[in-house]
Amino acid sequence: MSTTSVDLQSHGQAAGHAAAHHDDPHHQHHFTTMEQQFDTSKIGMWLFLATEVLLFGGLFVGFGMMQARYPQEFVEAHTHLVRWQGSLNTVVLLISSFTMVLAVTAAKKSQKSKQVLFLSLTIVCAVIFLIVKYFEYAHKWEEGWLPGKYYSYKADPIPACTITPGPPTAAATTPAPNAQPCTNGYSTFFSFYFMMTGLHGIHILAGIGVLTWLLIRARRGEFSASYYTPVDLVGLYWHLVDLIWIYLFPLYYLIQ
Amino acid sequence: MSNHTETPAASAAAHEHEHGGVAIYAKTLIALLFLTAITIAAASFNFGQGNVVIALAIATMKGSLVVLFFMHLRWDKPVNRIIAMAGFLFLGIFIAFCLLDFNSRNNYVPQNMHPTVIPLAPGTAPAGAVERTNPAALAAEGEKK
Amino acid sequence: MDHAIAVTPQVGSRPRPKKNYLNETKGFRSWALTLDHKRIGVMYLVGVLFAFLLGGIFALLVRLTLLTPSHMLFGKVLLTAEQYNRVFTLHGAIMVFLFIIPAIPASLGNFVLPLMLGAKDVAFPRLNLCSFYLWVTGALMAIAAMVFGAVDTGWTFYTPYSTTTDGPVTLMTGAVFVLGFSSIFTGLNFIATTHKLRAPGMGWFDLPLFIWGIYSTAIIQVLATPVLGITLVLLMLERSFGIGIFDPRIGGDPVLFQHFFWFYSHPAVYIMILPGMAIISELIPTFSQKTMFGYRAMAYASVSLALVSFIVWGHHMFVAGQSQLATVVFSALTFLVAIPSGVKLYNWLGTMYKGNIKLDTPMLYAISFLILFAIGGLTGIFLGTLATDVHLTDTYFVVAHFHFVMVGGTVTAFIGGLHYWWPKMTGRMYSEAWGRVGCALWNIGFNMTFLTQFFLGSKGMPRRYYNYLDQFQPLHAFSTVGSWVLGLGLFITAAYLLASLRKPMDAPDNPWNGTTLEWQTSSPPIAHNFEDQPVLEREPYDYRPVLAAR
């Protein structure tokens, strides 16, 4: 048969090659070499990151469309965001990306104490980010700058519209005579603010969870030059979280 | 990539050294912090529409630094680069076509529209039937009177 | 290098292994926690076929309700208007999200792709199992939504109706969200597998065209589905928080929802058709015993279909309120996407030309596909043309068009593929005579049901309407009777396929004299696929020895 004549050779090679690597407890049976396994994992992670780009990207598109629709209200609403807090968070995340890449480098060089140090620092930065976020959210809650129908801040230049809940009826959709012009731009701005920073915050939280798991494994000495895949992949995820914030920050905090 | 004559740790260290080692990451961080300062400063000036363009351009520069250096894409295999670019490319397509639609819309207001009389087919109109017309235009005309 | 390889010998050359992937391990846990792509494929197959049955029952209900304008059956109204809206929504949502999007990639693709690549499994077996359980979760959530009264929005969930209507919209859209991730992870797995787990000697242009088709599908799954995810999240938040993005009464834009929705859902229809085409590209060379005509063109056509599918979504929105400029641009781009489809059709015909055609059941389905897909695809062009679309949109013409491509196209190919790989998956051959009966009823029933609907639509019958003018009744009745013939055909097909499982395992390794690697292993395969790592030594679809011998 066509395959068997060459099989004995290739099987022998594969067996010899495999013997050297199958000792590695992390080697999965359907891969021939650890290198193939590592490269495949990387491709898988980049594909996942592409899906995250499109997921968040959809929110950016929505934000862009709504901003085009309510330019004045969006600019006025954004003055309620505190610039120094956003800037601090940006710096904190950039530093956390740096510490993360140092953690990956340490894992590649089998340096256990540095792995632990830099993973811990990354987690600390992430926690600082969330603490600042907490203060921002608390302030919004107090002032009534909340999403959608929960928006209750009264001092906007143009008042928000009142919404009649339920299915459309003739009465609900016909504007009352002499009604004041009203706009939903403010509540829409904060809807998007909470959606986007919220989804981002959930990713930070998940990141803290995964980084903690990595930290525990790193302390056990599981990562070294021959196997550091999880550190590398989590690093890629973490950089993406940073990347999303790099775009979020100017759009929300800096646009005039 | 695995070199059987060296230990894995040594070959990894050599690999890192080729790419500039830790120094390149430190330089990247400094560049990122510098660009952050620039973008914050730029926001305090009023360039009109330019503000958005500048902010997004700086964000893209920062993003590129993160992707190329922190995420190691500069030295990575082509397939990973293609995947990364594909994500951003198709997002760009989504944004572009939505903007195309939105920016070319709303050119019709009732005042622009001419009242079009749509004749009924001959022989089909029952007695007393009214010729159909464009309601929006008629409403606008009604308002103007 | 000499490519003249002897054709794989037939039955009896290799003793059948006692242990195969089906009986290697036993018990519920060995299936529920399996990491074997073949078992996962089989579990998916059972799942999607149940979804097909459920969606089919709803379809029969819809057609039965439309048998007469009074909606009466045996003196009673079968469905009220409210119930009718829910039933056609369920038919659409189940068929699209639970059946046709996962069906070929997750069932046949999961089973065959690693075998064709000469691999032991997919790149990420645990992620594969996770995909399956996500599918199950989505299915259970959808069933829960049905129990809680179902939704009446149509499978497209257009706003602002979907953001304000009563009913378990959030639960239903949540189900679709979960199913979306099942699809994303499957696509991710297949891309990584195709890149890294090919047999030694197998370059990109040595891949079977089934792989090219599944790979192109996977690209769409990974890039488009996340946008559906965020669309559904925005829909759910609009319902619960009134965020003001889609509902005009609170400042939103309903057309924006449609942009979001169709950015995924148009590429999604290529997730549906590309695997179908992928199967046809296997069936036609094998049952013509001839090399694929224009192999590289076919590969490029698959990938270009995937990529171009992303820039035409606005053709679903011609009358929705898009700008005129956007409308014209999308219409022009829609004509582009017909080109690779045309290339494929001509190349399949070119493959059959002067081939040694064997009209086994899979080939009968493949030929049916060519005709039905041609009609479906051409009518898509009518709909992509602005002037005709204004009249045909939201009529039964559209309904007929998409059923021709999805059912006449994808489902026909799916059934053909199921028959083709049935011996490989189960180790048994089905009854060829009954296979022909099933295929005949499929074609008769399908055309009775859906060809009629082109006429219904062009005469003005709107889609999703409960009430209709008396003049449409004869055509509606004919379509309904067609649905019974279709149902009968499917029932017979299911019956003889299931009956074959009671026979002993007697299928040869390569009953069809196929050239792809899955035919090099036993039927059914052993748990780790191949005794020895296969090494590719021939071009894809190399039938030169067969042709030389004629």
Image (cartoon, helix red, strand yellow):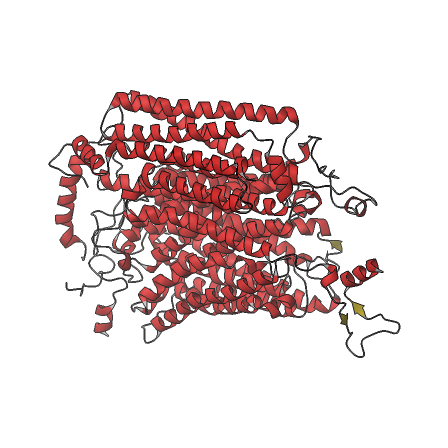
Q: Residue furthest left?
A: B5
Number of marks in the rendered image: 0
Q: Residue at x 73, y 44 (%)?
A: A167
Q: Quadrant of residue C133?
A: top left
Query: Between C345 and B21, which is closer to the camera in this rendering?
Result: B21
Left or right of A92 in this view: A110: left
Any part of residue A99 in sight = yes
Any part of residue C239 in sight = no
Query: Between A120 and A15, which is closer to the camera in this rendering?
Result: A120
Query: Between A236 and C189, which is closer to the camera in this rendering?
Result: A236
Q: Quadrant of the N terminus of chain A?
A: bottom left
Q: Position of residue C319 (x, y in %)?
A: 64, 61
Q: Look at the picture and state if C242 lies above or below C524.
A: above
Q: Position of residue B57 (x, y in %)?
A: 44, 45
Q: Look at the picture and state if C510 lies above or below A178.
A: below
Q: Look at the picture and state if C216 lies above or below A185.
A: below
Q: Residue at x 68, y 67 (%)?
A: C460
Left or right of A208 in this view: C396: right
Left or right of B53 in this view: C448: right
Query: Between C440 and C333, which is closer to the camera in this rendering?
Result: C333
Left or right of C132 in this view: C91: right
Q: Residue at x 40, y 31 (%)?
A: A94
Q: Quadrant of the C terminus of chain A?
A: top right
Q: Residue furthest right?
A: B128
Q: Position of residue C474 (x, y in %)?
A: 69, 69
Q: Quadrant of residue C285?
A: bottom left
Q: Position of residue A24 (x, y in %)?
A: 22, 31
